[in-house]
Image (tube, rainbow, N blue to C red):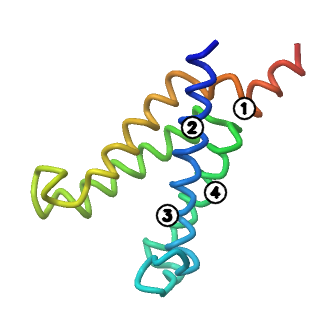
Amino acid sequence: MTENVLRSILRIVIGFTFTCHGVQKLFGMLGGLHGHAAHFPHLLWFAGLIESVGGTLIVLGLFTSPVAFVLAGEMAVAYFTVHYPHNFFPLRNGGEPAVLYCFIYLYLCAAGPGLISLDRALRRRKT
C-alpha cells in the first residue's frame, strides 16, 4: 500500500515538473526559451505540446502506461538529438534531466500509476 501511494506521489511530482517544461516551450512562461515561445511547426513546439498534454495526463494518472511510454521515447529522442552530440556523459552535455525523465517514465509504464489515479478509479468503476 505504501509503495503504491509513494508511486502516485512520484508520478504527480514528475508529471507536474514535466508539464512546466512544456508550458515553457509553448508559452515562453516560467523562464523558458528566454521569454519566447516556440512557434508552430518548429520541433520545440511539438515537444512543448507533448510535454504539456502528456505531463497533465501523468499528473491525473490517466492512460498512465501508454503516455509514460511516449514520454520516455520523447526524452530518449531529446537526449540523442540534442545532448549526446556534445558529449557522451549526461553531466557534461546537460542531458541529465532527459535521462532521469526517460527512466522514470519507463518505470511508470511498467509499474502503473499507483493507488491515487484516474486509471485506478475508472478500472474500479468498471468492475
- Residue 73 is situated, as x and y percent measured from the top left of the image, at 41, 45
Most distant residue in the front direction: 2
Label 4, label 2: how many angstroms apart (C-alpha)?
A: 14 Å
Query: Mark 1 sits on what residue?
Result: 117
> With 126 as the anchor, is 18 left or right in this view?
left
Would you identify the image quadrant in which residue 116 lies?
top right
Q: Earlier in the sequence, mark 1 or mark 2?
A: 2
Q: Say which of 77 and 26 sits in front.
A: 26
Q: Amino acid at mark 2?
A: Arg
Q: Earlier in the sequence, mark 4 or mark 3?
A: 3
Mark 4: few/some/many CA within 10 Å (<14, 14-19, 20+): some
- Look at discs 4 and 3 and give the one toward the viewer: 3
Query: Mark 2 sits on what residue?
Result: 11
Query: Mark 4 sits on what residue?
Result: 53
Q: Earlier in the sequence, mark 4 or mark 2?
A: 2
Tag on residue 21? 3
Label 4, label 3: how many angstroms apart (C-alpha)?
A: 11 Å
Q: Amino acid at mark 3?
A: His
At x 50%, y 44%, the residue is 70
At x 52%, y 81%, the residue is 28
